[in-house]
Amino acid sequence: MLLCRAAQPACAARGYGYAGYGLRDGDGHVRLVRGGQSFDSFDAADTTAPILSAVGVSGTTQTATALSATSNEAATGTWIVVARNAAAPTSAQVKAAAAYSGVAIVASGSGAMSAAVARAFAVTGLAAGTNYDVYVVAEDGSANLSTPPVKAQLATLFAPVTSYTGTPPGVAGSVTASFTGGGAACGYTPGQFVAGSSLPSAPPGGIAFPQGLFQFAIGNCTPGSTLSFTIAYAQPLPANAQYWKYGKTPGNATPHWYTLTVADNALNISGSTVTFNITDGGLGDDDVSANGQISDPGGSGAPSGASNATGIPTLSEWGMMLLSGLMALFGWVQMRRRNG
Ligand SMILES: [Ca+2]
Ligand SMILES: [Ca+2]
């Protein structure tokens, strides 16, 4: 073992441009030594690629998600997002984060990864209601690139649907059921047509729902938020119409018939439009829980003896118009969801 100065030919010939001192051992290896480091740590060059694990996404929204990955050694992680079922990239293609084989890169990024520590990468710029594949690679400080890329699947949330318009069969004109409020992700979930006779309790005396009731569900709302609904019909409603619902109410866990009120729901029936508010967990929310979801079986109705003298449709006709319209609306929603 001898002291070697890098500037000396014997040292320079071994590739050391470092103008410091090193030790050359009996094998002829030149070593640069820092305090506390053993010679053994230099004996083998790192030819082992990092190993990625725990690759997945969480907290996915309409346009973003959090990608998490863990490398077994310190590395630079690189990820790309491509369309679901696009041709798989090579590790080098992921590292390059550029279009390959006709596959466009939707989003990409990179960052340092500590050994054996989950690394979170913020993925943004995604489209709502879309399926993607995510590929991740890690490269250590010796240019060893993990292979093959680790793949994770990603599906963004659908943009919330807050308004439906449909034309009830046999009626000239459309019905629009819409709401506002509840936060950016708050939207209708697939609805369900419920026949009135299927409910375990008979409708209240004098009020008939021959065509059943319409039930919707709204989800992903800010818990406890208040939603403002508007149901607009093509023709005016009877003067004595009310908005009837069946289910639980605050303080009464036994499902029962009730009407929305001006005091609790700011109910207003005017002309051809019904407006009302429902607060998550309040009167009109069938789950009676401030849980970010509102379940609402209900519909407009009036006493079956309502005057038809002015040519206003009878209740059963109103019910048919309302319910068939909503049934059509939510049938369409379900189709849309299935096709989405
Ligand atoms: Ca390595
Ligand atoms: Ca609720």
Image (cartoon, helix red, strand yellow):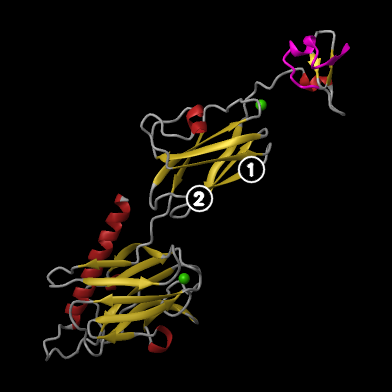
Residue 65's mark? Answer: 2
Residue 62, quarter of picture: bottom left
Asked if residue 209 lies left or right of residue 6, the reply is left
Q: How many marks?
A: 2
Front position in the image: 21 or 8: 8
Q: Give the amino acid type for the residue marked by disc 2 in the picture.
A: Thr
* Front residue of this view, candidates 41 and 6: 6
The residue sitting at 57% across, 28% down in the picture is 146
Q: Position of residue 265 (x, y in %)?
A: 40, 83
- Marks 1 & 2, CB-CB < 8 Å contact: no
The residue at 33%/69% (across/down) is 215
Neighbour tally class for label 2: few under 14, some 14-19, many 20 plus, Cα within 10 Å: many
Which amino acid type is marked by label 1? Ala
**Which quadrant of the frame does ligand 1 lie within?**
top right
For the residue pair 304 and 199, the one nearer the viewer reads as 304
Q: Which mark is residue 118?
A: 1
Element on which disc 2 rests: strand
Say what secondary structure mark 1 lies in: loop
Q: Is residue 75 above or below residue 107?
A: above
Measured from the top left, where is residue 256 in percent x and y?
39, 80
Residues under labels 1 and 2: Cα distance? Answer: 15 Å
Mark 1 is surrounded, within 10 Å at the Cα level, by few (under 14), some (14 to 19) or many (20 or more) other residues, namely: some
Q: Nearer the viewer, residue 108 or 241?
A: 108
> Residue 313: x and y, percent?
15, 83
Could you tell me which residue is drawn at 65 percent across and 21 percent down? Answer: 47
Q: Which residues are magenta?
A: 1-19
Q: Quadrant of residue 140?
A: top right
